[in-house]
Amino acid sequence: ITEVCGAKRVGYFGPAQFYIALKLIAAAQSGFPVRIESIKNELPLPRFTALKADSEVRHGTPAELHGVKFQVPHAALEKNSYKRTDEGDKQEPKSPPMSPICSPPASPSTYQRIPLSYGYSKSRSGLEQQHAAPYEVRHSAPQQDGPSAGNYGAKPSLASSALNRSLPEQQESSAHYSDDPWRITEEQRDYYINQFRSLQPDLNSFISGSVAKNFFTKSKLPIPELSHIWELSDVDCDGALTLPEFCAAFHLVVARKNGYQLPETLPETLLPQYLQAASLKGLRDCALFEPAESLPGGQQARDFSRPETTSAEEPDKAALLQDGKKEDKQALQVSTALKMIPKEFQHLTVKTAAQESNALRARPRSRSYSSTSIEDAMKKGEEPPTPPPRPQKSHSRASSLDLNKIFQQNTQAVRSGWLPPPPPALPPRPSVSQTEPPAEAELHPQINRPPSQAEENSSAKKEAVLAQPPSKPTRRKLRTEAQGLDTPELSPTINVTSSLPAVKPHLPVQKQSSKQKRAIQTAIRKNKEANAVLARLNSELQQQLKEVHKERIALETQLEQLRPVTVL
Amino acid sequence: QNYPLYIRSIPTENELKFHYTVHTSLDVVDEKISAMGKALVDQRELYLGLLYPTEDYKQRGYGYVTNSKVKFVMVVDSSNTALRDNEIRSMFRKLHNSYTDIMCNPFYNPGDRIQSRAFDNMVNSMMMQVC
């Protein structure tokens, strides 16, 4: 097979060779002779172990070979470790002919074997995911083409920092190769941020359309392409670019200049909320180390792990893997695998798959949001009766309870996300005011998506927010409105939750079992309140959305009237 | 100057007829606009009535004018499902929204032909829905 697919001749397995090789394996397994002609037949998916056959049948993509390929390696992650070793062994015979840096499958097989040894990450909330997301960008396997890279990017997110340390040289090359052309590396991100600063010093504000136009015109790309890039990157269609949008646009320009075709839809790794979480998470990790000493000792170690667990939650793949939802992974794999291939039906499947994966992610995300809003309510309720230090203590008690691990992580993560940036003396108030605006502001950028996803995005941003929230004018106005609306909402919940702080001080006194029961009851209550709050919020935001639309149309007409009469 | 910014149709056997109808309906739209006077600027406008009895089938044309005097004209076959007024209006609203999205793009100069892929996709999906 190696010979037939041309690997021997070329000396390594490039993407084409790899695809042909896998197709030949399928042919061989189906009983066809191993020849080039046999790959022209419609073949069933290649089976690497008997156990995987059904999962691959389930994954069945249309006759598109590429999509199939990358679900096969992914199936490995979902099975038990012994099954994975099987596949690892199967792929090992391919690795010898490959050169270490250039050939795509070499590093994927390496990456695969390392996640093998870590077993399931689902049950582990700790170390692996801590470093998962910050290193995710660097971990991308060196690939020459787009499709596989997205998936391999997902797998290393399982691996811990050991992977990072053990392959330093591959990382250098991977950074240069930019494995997945739609994934922004750290250096690129820094460069984009500097460019953004040169145009607009305030990183949280946005670049206006004309400024951006002048800037991107300098790249000498043809105007229609620039227009298309703008269309892709300006997700909220407001004629201005925020930092993540700008990074996405710049990245697309860079990719285009390097010869990549522009995609039909914005790749997942360039979506604003993804970029925002990724970028701010990096900043937050640095910020964490500063106030570390000032925090009480017991919380220190936990704070380090928690924001990284949340940051692990934010990026799509880590969250998916954490929940272990197979459908999510498959949808994501299909979407990333098919991303680069310029065909129409794939374009549609990308969109639907992305939407599915987004919708499926809504569930785990909404929980983190609900916990944050409950924290708001609790904090507001606690402040009048108790002095500021108290709420922190109650939170730490909540964290010590053995609740659902995800809920636990979320509360911890949220708290730690708030604590570091403001000085420790004033955590409750500024964080409360901070979380309110981000809640509203970040719901707006996601206007085009379903509200549930808007909530999850807001939670993502909320936990990642360090400084002032983005200050787009229309959104600020709506935000203050929403804030006004939101506080009366929370006040009814405060009445209910005011009993909670009273309960909480007694907790350490009670025995373990009753503490747990009470905790579960409070958790249930909290979730119900969160649901009510969110439902109301949702309807109000829908109203505001309509108003914003009307405003926009009015503005557009005004703008056009100001222009000369050529339109007539 | 009523040059078209964007034309899209679903290929049928009488495609040329549709184009022709669209073109003639422009005159009717112009007439309506000028007749409205200065005070009333109605954002949406809806009219039926281009009949071609000689061809033994009717076509209906719908017009829509934005505040910036950009006209959207839609011609549908009457023998097709009787599209309700609301649906037509929602289609025009979608068109208008997509048009404003295009406007937000700083690389788009008003008066250019519309080459936005998002707009194309939206129009295609709308047409698929109807047919």
Image (cartoon, coloured by chain):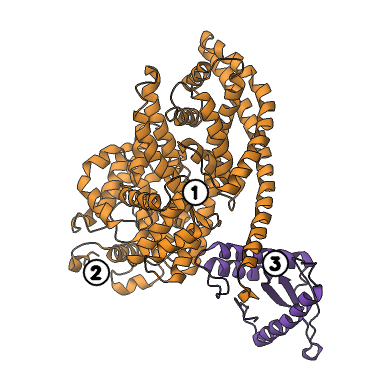
Extreme residue toward the top, this view: A509
Q: Do circles 2 and 3 both sit on a common chain?
A: no
Q: Nearer the viewer, residue A343 or A37?
A: A343
The chain holding disc 2 is A
Identify the residue under disc 1. Answer: A327
Which part of the image, by quadrant, shows the C terminus of chain B? bottom right
Identify the residue under disc 3. Answer: B67
Q: Quadrant of residue B94?
A: bottom right
Which part of the image, by quadrant, shows the N terminus of chain B? bottom right
Q: Is residue A263 visible to us here?
A: yes
User: Residue B95, percent across and down?
Assistant: 65, 67
Identify the residue under disc 2. Answer: A4
Task: Please tell me whether mark 2 sits on a helix, a strand or a loop.
Answer: loop
User: Residue A443, percent across and down?
Assistant: 57, 44
Task: Please tell me whether mark 3 sits on a helix, a strand or a loop.
Answer: loop
Rendered position, A307 above or below A90: above
Residue at x 32% of width, y 74% of height:
A37
